[in-house]
Amino acid sequence: MVTVSGRHRMRSSLRGAGAAAAATALVLVVAGSWFGYQQLAGPSCSGKIQLSLAAAPEIAPAVKGAADQWVADGAAVGGTCIAVNVTSAEAVDVAAAVASKHGATLAGVGQASGTAVTPDVWVPDSSTWLLRLKSGGATAFAPANGASIARSPVVVAVPEPVATRFGWPNKKLSWTDMLRQVTSDKPLRAGIVEPTQDAAGLSGLMSLTAAASNTGNAGTDSSEAMVGALRALATNRSSLRQDLLARFPRSSDPTAIANGLGAAALSEEDVIAYNNTKPPIPLAALYLEPAPMPLDYPFAVLPGIEPAKASAAKVLFELLTTPGFKNRLAAQSLRSPDGNWGDGFKAPQGAPSPANGGASAVPPIGQGGAADLDPIAIQKVTSTWSVATQSGRMLCVIDVSGSMKQPVATANGASREQVTVEAANKGLALFDDSWSIGLWTFSTNLVGSQDYRKMVKIAPLSGNRRALQQGLASIKPSSGNTGLYDTLLAAYKEVQEDWEPGKVNSIVLFTDGKNEDDNGITQKQLIDQLKKIRDPEQPVQVIIIGIGSDVSRAELTPITEVTGGRPFVTVDPSKIGEIFLQAIALRPPAPR
């Protein structure tokens, strides 16, 4: 059984009286669709295959109803009886457990609960979880099947009085329209459930940032538009869906509407469930164009389960694709994978469906799932969000050895130094004024016999940003070698000296080579010194970003293991910007 953490959203509590009605509907669903599977049920079966399945809370009742019906009808495979244990589990909790098991790291996802175990079959709300695990380092993570068993479009939920001002329900709106509303001089109060922990929030964020990236065509700097959108959402972000929903206006009073939450990316099912509670101000579901990634509920058979369980899972999946299951989904306000809905589904006003002439607004079956998602784009958005919305204290240390003069073929001939400085500048634009950042450079004998130069002292960006920009602009490669070990030890002591509580205190060091300082300390001496001076109560994380083919991961890994960090190595220096964002985003939560 997968333990569900109370720190995440609890969709079931939204339903109130609607939950009882849905449960009644489940009981009344006819069982005719099961007759075709009677040959699988052995009245004289023996033994028992215990199949565990963890499903997103909103779809769990439908899956459990179908599984219970199958078991009641005598579920068996190969003469062995089958028992199915369906549990309701937030996707982020299962993802944390799977990540822990497979050695993956997911931006914004905390540690797995000590009691959490991975199920045999997982039905998260979105295929993005499977892709994030794979791109997060779980290279051996290869779940079977992964086909969608349900769908819920991602919408922008807006209080109806506010939506009517936008022209709802008659006017078609785009994500560019929403971007203007969110970043205007008098912005709409938009919120989001942490997109690193919530698939609907991630989908909405990807659509909004895609709209921001296109604003350059209108003469606006796209990076500024993106940062503006991220900051606007971050102001009203929440890790709890219930908390976010509680911010919508609870009174028709104009002041309450003006001060309440004005928009949030949610699933269609969330909006239906919220409105079923009969709130004073219902939510309108805006189906913005282009349509964002829907929640697609993949049926993922996790790797490592025994063959008998895999056979049972295969039959269970077949049961979850029958016409009768579509009606079970409808009782939970969910659609079937093709975008259609079953009997009793109460669609929000303006909801597209192939059944009512809206086929162009609903991707056909087979689209919108894992095969159509870009893991690099997902990783970039989650990393950018994490960097733009968190605070920290960091010393940036940049290699200026002679090898940094080398041109980068994939960067129009710019040098390694230039692409590194450009990445640092772009990262600096994402950090808000609550960050404290300093800047060093290093080579060998850079200041007399000292391998490093202290360019900008670590200080809040509110008064330090201009100095950092000027410092980065002045960086030029030297003719020296790479004095890595002496510099790293000095940088560690510098960050440790004025350690700040409540923030992640870290060093991010860029280098394109191995340690080449014959007069400096050895790797063993560096590690011994770090072990001696480190303080578990005041940790300093070291992240080393290696650029080019001359970097030795084997040399860097033992160093970062001591400090709780990680080396990132890219052979192509033009990718340094993406690596920088990824490295910052994967930092641990700040100690308190």
Image: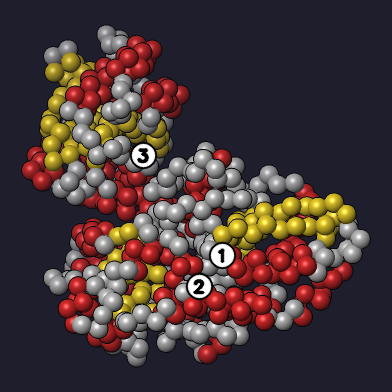
Q: Give how far apart the Cα atoms at labels 1 and 3 are.
A: 29 Å
Task: Say if 80 sits above or below 545 in the image.
Answer: below
* Residue 208 visible from this viewpoint: no
Proximity of marks 1 and 3: CB atoms separated by less than 8 Å: no
Q: Earlier in the sequence, mark 3 or mark 2?
A: 2
Q: What residue is pinned by disc 3?
A: 588
Q: Residues within 10 Å of mark 1 (few under 14, many from 20)?
A: many
Q: Residue at x 24, y 30 (%)?
A: 397
In depth, the one of 360 and 263 nearer the eye is: 263
Q: What residue is pinned by disc 2?
A: 152
Mark 1 residue type: Tyr
* Residue 79 visible from this viewpoint: yes
Residue 455 place in picture, x, y as percent: 13, 30
Q: Quadrant of residue 276?
A: bottom left
Q: What residue is pinned by disc 1?
A: 297
Q: Residue at x 26, y 44 (%)?
A: 423
State the SS at label 3.
Answer: loop
Q: Earlier in the sequence, mark 1 or mark 2?
A: 2
Q: Residue at x 19, y 49 (%)?
A: 432
